[in-house]
Image (cartoon, grey):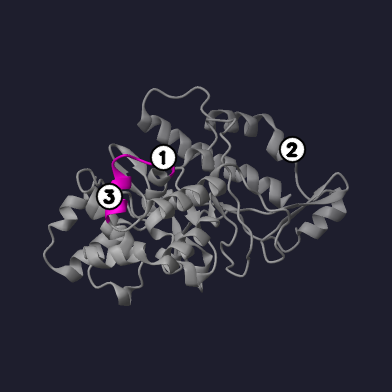
Amino acid sequence: METLQSLLAEKNMKVRNAQIKRAFMPYTAPICVNGFEEQTIVVLLNLALLNANCKDYLNADTAREFLQSEDNINRSLTAISWFHTHNLKYPDCRVNKQKLLCLESSKYPNLVSHYSSSTELGWANNSNQYQYPLWLLSSFVWQGKVTSLFNFLIENDATWMPLLAKFGLTKKRASLIKKSLKEALSKSSFPDSVHPLSKRLRFPWKGEELTITPVVNHGFQTALERYFRSPECRFNTIRLLLPNSAAIGSLAGALGGNMRLLNYPLSVRPHSKRTLSSSREKTHRFFDDFAMVNKKTCGLLRRLSGESPLATPKKQMQVRRYQILALRRQIGVWLMH
């Protein structure tokens, strides 16, 4: 695991700044900051400043100026109300005034979903507020646990709070931030309606139309971006360049909109005489439901969810690849009926 101590050893300020900034971005695995708590605060506060206002991320004076500014505190308080677990603005930045915060625990521990990813939070709102939540949300490892400054503010941590006070965070402002965090993160929050610009999938269901809006989980997407950059990555990916990335969210903004996606297209070819409409006319159904409920598919799903695990991780990985490929074929049969 990379440490802040090793990054601080770099003498060239330009190189050091680049390395430090990258280390605290959401697409990078969190670094260990044990013993360098004060320097961590300095770096995070400077990251929240515009680049023109901070030449050196280790400059304690500019860090102190950030916390002493009432405008910066107010903007940080506004940003807190847009912390989320799922980003409703991805991939269209025009979606606005909506957030999704899901704090419920999983009922299915073996299911691959956002519940199995980290509990790191993201942010998404107007692009002109992009930098203000960085000092609160940026993740790092402290005493063996992945955490962020907003956790220490909520817990009134005995180690970190005096250090924040040293850099100008008064008790009144700390109390105000803590109150805002508790109010924003105390319970799950879901939008009352689907934004007109949100993506929707439509399915026939019981004689009517069922609409599902897929949403991306910040922790799951962050974990994928980190894995894509690791030497162990074996995933097939494609790149997606999103405009106005800072308005999409904290992760997209950090990547400049240059996102990577899993790329596993179905191994099927179009058939000129077999279309969705012709299938509908012939069978009076859109999909081959039997393909998803037959014995083969149900067996694949049971094994993928952890039933009858194999002896070694290597064998488990090999069999899992086959199972996923077989399941994808079944999904293809279901869709292409």
Residue 119: x and y in percent read: 46, 43
Residue 9: image quadrant is bottom left
Taken as a whole, is the magenta stretch helix, strand or loop? helix
Q: Is residue 165 magenta?
A: yes
Residue 250: x and y in percent read: 46, 61
Q: Is residue 43 magenta?
A: no
Q: In the rendered structure, find residue 163 and report the number of the disc placed on it.
A: 3
* Residues at marks 2 and 3, CA–CA distance in whole angstroms: 62 Å
Looking at numbered disc 1 in the image, what kind of residue is underneath it?
Glu
Looking at numbered disc 3 in the image, what kind of residue is underneath it?
Leu
Q: Which residue is mark 1?
A: 155
> In the image, which residues are magenta?
154-166
* Residues at marks 1 and 3, CA–CA distance in whole angstroms: 14 Å
Q: Residue at x 48, y 54 (%)?
A: 122
* Residues at marks 2 and 1, CA–CA distance in whole angstroms: 52 Å
Q: Label 1, secondary structure: give it.
A: helix
Q: In terms of sequence position, does the residue under pointer 2 or pointer 1 come before the other?
A: 1
- The tally of labels here is 3
Vertical placement of residue 185 versus 130, above or below: above
Q: Nearer the viewer, residue 325 or 245?
A: 245
Q: Label 2, secondary structure: give it.
A: helix
Residue 64: x and y in percent read: 29, 63
Q: Which residue is mark 2?
A: 290
Is 284 on the left-hand or right-hand side of 16?
Answer: right
